[in-house]
Every structure is written in structure tokens, then in C-alpha cells.
Amino acid sequence: MNISDILTPKRTLADLNCSSKKRSLESVSQWLAEQMPNFDGKHVFNALINREKLGSTGFGDGIAIPHCRLASCDQVTGALVRLTNPIDFDAIDQQPVDLLFVLLVPLEATDEHLQILATLAGKFGQAEFREQVRQATDAEAIYQIAIA
Amino acid sequence: MIHAQITIINKLGLHARAAAKLVGVTGKHGCQIEIGSEGKMVDAKSIMSVMLLAAAQGTVLDLKVNGEGAQHAFDEVTQLVNNFFDEGE
């Protein structure tokens, strides 16, 4: 499973300005719903925030992978968002987060979900990759780095 | 050093929340803890590394614990895994 299977240039955002974890998830949910008519923004937001209540998806080093399972989702859908300013995300290492990879997953896609998490962990676990995404000039550049 | 095999038995496997719980347990211990399979052992205190394993239900993993308090750490990790990461299935 490759990142290019789940991410598109349109679902890559270079500079989202928001003040909190909740606001960031709200904005991203709305933005995704605008592009993908099968998703309801409010519904996506509720699912993401409910997942966060079970434990933060801020996995350290400024990275968060907010995700949820949705009945309205027929294939794993990703979105990569770089925030203008790092925000508190209750992360596992207590550090603020500035890179979000949002994952919307079909209800039954258990193995596929694990494969995608492994792919993302392989990328975002590398300091060099994180730095490249942070330094990229625009969304298109971020997308190219992500799928490389 | 303790070296044993554990089977991931929970339905969802080592997904993000289970990995976070594992790291929550391993991180409390000062000893070195590695998990994985031969050729791909990773630091069990790093959530990104644990997620790299993509261990689905039924996967048999090696668990290596080394250093002070190894037995205690080993017991806690196996208890978490064998208790389905407290997910109930």
C-alpha cells in the first residue's frame, strides 16, 4: 500500500491556520466534505473527535494521524495537512503538532488499515521526511514529497 | 534477557490505539524492550516503530526484554496483549 493510493494533490493542504485541536479537526472535516460529496463534514468531525477521546493520535515529533472508521467511506481516504502554527494536540510526547495525516477508513478494512498505518509510520518516523514536508514551498511540493 | 513469543489476539491487531497502549506500558520501564519478528525487531517504546509491524490478529511476534526490571516489564506487556489490549475482543 502506497501513500499515492490514498492521497491526492487536492487533499494536500500547505498552510491551515487554526488555534486548537478541535478547530483543526473541524476545519479539515469541512474541507474534506467540500471535496467529497459522500462525506458529511459534521459527521466526519464527530467521528474524528470521538476517536481522539479514546486517546490522542498525536504520535510524537509534531505528527498526528487523526483517523476514524466511517460507514459512508468505501475506500481508505487520506488527507495531509500542514498547519501554519503548531498546536497543542495532547500528543504522546506532549509536543505541539504541525503535521496532520487524516485517515478515513471503511468499517471493515482492518488489515488495510494496519498496512496504511505502517506506511505512514515508515514515512513520518523519519526526521528527514518530516523536515522536507515542513520546508516544502506549497501543497503540490508536499504532495510530491509524500508520495516519493 | 527474556526472549519469548507472543501472539496478537485482539480483533483489530496492533492498530494505533493498541500501539499507543503498548507504548504506554513499555515507556514506564527503564529496561530495553524490543518487539517484532526476526530481521525486523523494533523499539517497543516508539509508537511509530510499533505501527511499522502492521501486526494483524494472529501474528506471532518476538518480544525481547533486557535490563533491570525485565521480568516485570515482560509480565505487563504480555498481560496487555493477552487481555486484547483491553478492547474486549
Image (cartoon, rainbow, N blue to C red):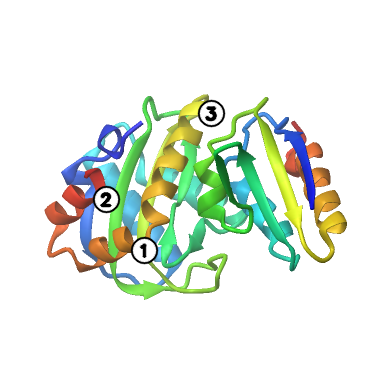
Write the residue at 47% across / 73% down: A88
Going from N to C along the chain, the mark reached first, 1 or 2, is: 2
Q: Which residue is denoted by mark 1 in the rendering?
A: A127
Residue A132 seen in the current view: yes
Whole-angstrom CA distance, mark 2 to mark 3, is 26 Å
Write the residue at 26% across / 50% down: A31
Going from N to C along the chain, the mark reached first, 3 or 1, is: 3
Which of the chains bears the disc numbered 3? A
In the depicted view, which residue is nearer to us: A48 or A117? A117
* A77 to the left or right of B14: left
Q: Which residue is denoted by mark 3 in the rendering?
A: A110
Q: Nearer the viewer, mark 1 or mark 2?
A: 1
The spot of residue B11 in percent (x, y) is 67, 29
In the depicted view, which residue is nearer to us: A95 or A81? A95
Say above or below: A11 vs A100.
Answer: above
For the residues labelled 2 and 3, say whether their Cβ atoms are less than 8 Å apart: no
